[in-house]
Image (cartoon, rainbow, N blue to C red):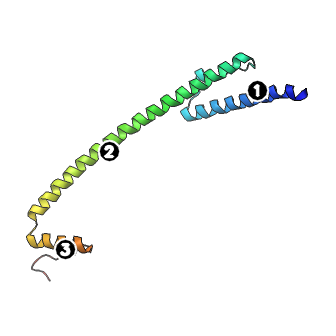
Amino acid sequence: MKSQWCRPVAMDLGVYQLRHFSISFLSSLLGTENASVRLDNSSSGASVVAIDNKIEQAMDLVKSHLMYAVREEVEVLKEQIKELIEKNSQLEQENNLLKTLASPEQLAQFQAQLQTGSPPATTQPQGTT
């Protein structure tokens, strides 16, 4: 008989602790106290519905916060991609220019270095030893 009386109290206490933890977690995640997430302290059957509503509200808040963060990250990544494409284009133009200015001997030496995997040799200017 005594255990039947303790179960609802323990369950109510557990639900209260879970609600308190959820609200604390959500507040720290969002960095604000949101008025729409405040809880009433009633222990009636209506409080279970209120808990469900509060959980749903909290989940909606988390979802909207995450969607905002993802959209923001996508914009940052799009900008980085744009910058990398521009940098790649610039480097390709520079590479093509260097290829046109290089002598056939320099190109052959470069190809040989690529095939052997050796580091590029430093060349001294012509006429100095």
Res 14 visible = yes
Q: Which residue is mark 1?
A: 12
Q: Nearer the viewer, mark 2 or mark 3?
A: 3
- In screen coordinates, is 98 left or right of 81? left
Residue furthest right in the image: 1
- The answer to whether mark 1 and mark 2 are in CB contact below 8 A is no
- Which quadrant would residue 116 be assigned to in this image? bottom left
- Mark 1 burial class by Cα count in 10 Å: few <14, some 14-19, many 20+: some
Determine whether the residue tagged by mark 1 lies in a helix, strand or loop: helix
Res 38 visible = no
How much space separates mark 1 and mark 2, taking CA atoms?
A: 51 Å
Q: Which residue is mark 2?
A: 80
Vertical placement of residue 103 versus 84, above or below:
below
Vertical placement of residue 23 versus 106, above or below:
above
| Disc nearer the start of the sequence (1/2) | 1
Vertical placement of residue 112 versus 20, above or below:
below
Vertical placement of residue 23 versus 116, above or below:
above
How much space separates mark 2 and mark 3, taking CA atoms?
A: 35 Å
Query: Which x, y percent locates residue 44?
Result: 75, 17
Question: Residue, x 40% and y 34% (percent of image)?
Answer: 71
Closest to the observer, 63 or 75: 63
Question: Residue, x 61% and y 26% (percent of image)?
Answer: 55
Quadrant into which the C terminus falls: bottom left
- In screen coordinates, is 60 left or right of 103? right
> Which numbered circle lies on residue 4?
none
Q: Amino acid at mark 1?
A: Asp
Query: Which x, y percent locates residue 62?
Result: 53, 31
| Disc nearer the start of the sequence (1/3) | 1
Q: Which residue is mark 3?
A: 112
- Which quadrant would residue 80 be assigned to in this image? top left
